[in-house]
Amino acid sequence: MPLLDVEDLQTYYTARGDVVKAVDGVSFQIEKGESLGIAGESGCGKTTLGLSLMKLLPPNGWVSGGKIRIDGQDIATMNENRFRKEVRWRKISTIFQGAMSALNPVYTIGHQLEEPLLYHQKISKKDAESKSIDVLKSVGMNKDVFHRYPHELSGGMKQRVIIAMALILNPKIVIADEPTTALDVIVQAQVINLLKKLKREQGLSIILITHDLGLISEIADKVGIMYAGRMVEFGSLEEVYNSPKHPYTDKLLKSVPRLKGRKRKLEFIPGTPPDLTNPPTGCRFHPRCHKVMEICSRQDPPTIIQNTQKTACWLYAKRSES
Amino acid sequence: MKNLAVVKNVTKWFPIRRSITDFLRGRPLKYVKAVDGISFNIKDNEILALVGESGCGKTTMGKLLLGSILRDSGIISFDGVALSGTGLESVRRQAQMILQDPYSSINPRFKVSDVVAEPLIVHKVAPDKAQRLEKIETALNEVKLTPAADFLDRFPHMLSGGQKQRVAIARALVLRPKLIVADEPVSMLDLSIRAEILELMLSLSKKFRIAYLYITHDLSTVRYIADRVAVMYLGKIVEIGTVDEVLQRSLHPYTKALIDAVPQPDPKNRLREIKLGVTGDIPSSVNIPSGCRFHTRCPYSTEICETVEPILTDDLRKGHNVACHHAEKIWRNSAR
């Protein structure tokens, strides 16, 4: 049984009377201990996907269809009370974006770390403190941080605290949405190494949501590329990075400036992502695609599976028919 | 090629407000030493990248060069004219700026035509309306917002992020400047359009012989746009040279660490840790460490580093210079 099984997930928002189909039929699975990277341009629905998994959608958003199973249990239809008691933070937790603002400035780090322990588990204040200190140590921090306030910590240290908070109830899955955007490169590298260590030593499954394809290759075992609410390509890191099949993935990889190796001309994708209240017909990428064919604008592309790589593109369907 | 801008030993310290008790106790004023003795040149039509972590003073340096804030000491001259008093006005006309966030650097109540017209009005270029419109349309065409007539009456909220940044570039371009200071011009943009904007900046530089000071924290874009690169750490330049020299044969341990820390899209990465020579965070620029300012984080640090401040070498190798006591050792090691 997969650890996380998302099947045909649809998450919609209402905005000024229109329905925005932010996530529109996304399916994927990850096994225990596997990490997933989700990439795409802004507005492709990757953050909404993360929020759907945590059931933290804003009031104007809702999951309108599909299934999300964690350890076989469907959480898409579970009511909020039960989800909060049994799943959120215990089985699936999140590292919030923007370490600078995610901590409450008027409470000590210790107070904020203990809170979920005291709420979820019937344990004494003393046990909660020792557990919190253990978690602080596991993210490479000194135990006296427990008594400090957020303003006394640097950006990198705050980010470590945020990671510690996500781990406090030993979840199996942690969603990290742009976990390092506010950090400098050297601090970012330290945080990446920490996530690698947690993955290796605790078998944590990290769902990394980012536009940074370099970052994904540091953490993820599997990669999903999203475009306009759809998963256009999904597969192992090696498959997707070494032999991208979808023209969007291919262009995206070629647009990354590289610091090492041969200097190639950077490519870019003309145009902008579509308005999701009124997405293009057929393949949603067809107006920007350099390999567009006549059929692309008429019909949704089929998903072609090769080994574990799934690609939603007409290019490969045609070949298999003929 | 002649030097367009010359910066020599420039400093800029910002005082921190003292609390009333500190004042009464007679405690001295403290300063953020944002720029603490910097020298470099930008040649005609050259693209110099200024790289460093946040808080290293790179943005302050850009503002000093434009004369939008004034230096405490040192010399800045632009096209042979010293940047002070009467010299300021001509510099402000010939040097323009592109900022990081096009969502906030463009007035949301201005139409595109008003945004691009602003510099023309301020500097009293093309006072006649028809002339101005012609210049605006030309600038929009040059940044590939075509047909220009379609964009003139649009408001910023009707544009995508990439288009907004093009408007910002058009605004900088309309006065035909000799220098553009571009402060993180692509870091807010989506990956797929970053390359497009960089490409545009590069082609404009060639076409109009514009020099750039390209300020960024992202070393990987530097390689695609810049001719030379200067690496800053806590208000000082620690290494400067051509892009190939600095990125491929870096001599300063800090430059090396910056290069190693950038994650490259390579599937092999997930199986290994990022090798990092340096530890900890960047110290505060109020209490700058003694000696070499990098010694608290440096893997090569020895006794001399704690007490003696290294100075930037003078033409060590093909214009490649470094401020490090151990540069020679590092050079020999890398040559092996």
Image (tube, coloured by chain):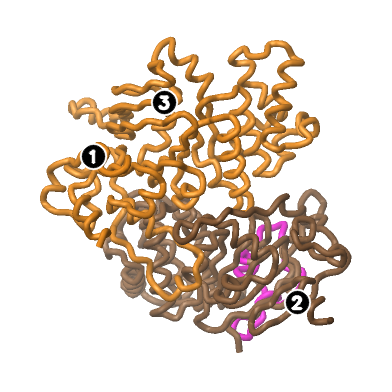
Chain colours: A brown, B orange
User: Dot 3: what SS?
Assistant: loop
Q: Quadrant of residue A164?
A: bottom left
Circle on res. A303 = 2
Give residue B309's position: percent from left, percent from top. Answer: 18, 40
Residue B2 - label: 3
Q: Quadrant location of the C terminus of chain B? A: bottom left
Identify which residue is drawn at 58% across, 77% down.
A236
Binning the other alpha carbons within 10 Å of mark 2 as few (below 14), some (14 to 19) or many (20 upward) gives some
Near-viewer residue (B105 or B232): B232
Task: Measure the C-alpha gap from mark 3 to mark 1.
Answer: 22 Å
Kindly identify which residue carries mark 1.
B313
Residue A58, position as x, y percentages in the image: 66, 58
Q: Residue at x 29, y 60 (%)?
A: B277
Q: Residue furthest bottom?
A: A1
With respect to residue B327, does B37 lie above or below? above
- Residue type, numbered disc 2: Thr
State which region is magenta: A50-79
Numbered disc 2: secondary structure: strand
- Residue B312 showing in the rendered view: yes
